[in-house]
Amino acid sequence: MTASLVRDDRTEKGLGWPYPWERLTIASGLLFVAIQIATVAFNVAFFLTAHPPMDASPAETARGFARAETMVEIGTYLYVLHMPFWLLFLGGLFGVLRRAEGSSGALSISALGGGLAMAVIAPIGALVSSLTPIMGQLGGDAATVKAIDAMTPLALALSAFPRAVLLGATSVVLLEGRVTPRWIGWTGLVLGLVSLVSTGTLLVPALFPFLAIGTLLFVVWVLVLTLALLRDTRTESTVAPRVEDASRRSVEPGVR
């Protein structure tokens, strides 16, 4: 009787994924990672070729962005292209975490909220920075153009706050629920601390390389987590006993 409260026919047949779309949403994490890697590769090429030098004067920066309009447009589109796949991945991850956590689901909801905040903050910075070419072409104030170019790293630093929440909450649930190998959870906790430290870029711009490395490591962590979840067909059966125990405790007094 208790098992029927938490398991459906698909679970009883031994399938690890109780809902047909959940595995596909988790797999969206692979597309998220692929787009992020492509974005990094493009930005590296952009900085090595068309991006104005970081130590350029405001006037030189404005002229440089005016000439690099196409590169900026492509880079901006790549920067936001990951959003639908990231949102799908978040939905699938929330489902896994919610079952693993049970109880109130406070950590699962915190992870979801952190991921949603990330999906908004960093892309907004990129969209604002994308205005630099047209401002340069229209003869806008050169100092303003140079200042707006700094919006992308600042937004990335700001998004490290919710990223730390996502990493911390997810890792705790992974460790408690034993959904994935424990080293993934411990690594996530370390990266959460790295994310918190990297928010110092908002105060000390020289910390940006630390922020960039932390961001890249987060993408690698998402890749590892996605592969671990997709390969573990026992996702549901691993956490079901925890949910069943909680359900049994809640219904046994009534049965007696």
Image (spheres, grey):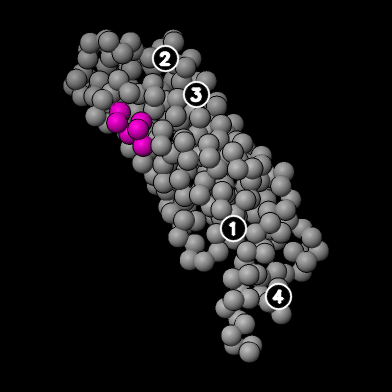
Q: Distance of mark 2 from mark 1, alpha carbons?
A: 43 Å
Towards the viewer: 200 or 141: 200
Residue 109 drawn at (x, y percent)? 46, 57
Badge 3 element: helix
Above or below 190: residue 90: below
Q: Which residue is mark 3?
A: 40
- Most distant residue in the bottom direction: 256
Looking at marks 2 and 4 on the same chain, the residue that comes earlier in the sequence is marked by 4
Secondary element at image label 1:
helix
Instruction: Locate residue 187, reporting x and y percent.
Output: 53, 36
Residue 83 sits inside the magenta stretch: no
Tag nearer the camera, 2 or 4: 4
Q: As rendered, which of 187 and 214 lies closer to the eye?
A: 187
> Magenta part of the protein: which range?
196-201
Q: Earlier in the sequence, mark 1 or mark 4?
A: 4
Q: Main secondary structure of the magenta part?
A: helix
Q: Earlier in the sequence, mark 2 or mark 3?
A: 3
The answer to whether residue 197 is magenta is yes
Asked if disc 2 and disc 4 are in contact, CB closer than 8 Å, the reply is: no
How many residues crowd around disc 4 within 10 Å: few (fewer than 14), some, or many (20 or more)? few
Give the mark toward the camera: 2 or 1: 1
Image quarter of residue 164: top left
Write down the residue under mark 2: 47
Name the residue carrying label 1.
Answer: 100
The CA distance from mark 3 to mark 4 is: 48 Å
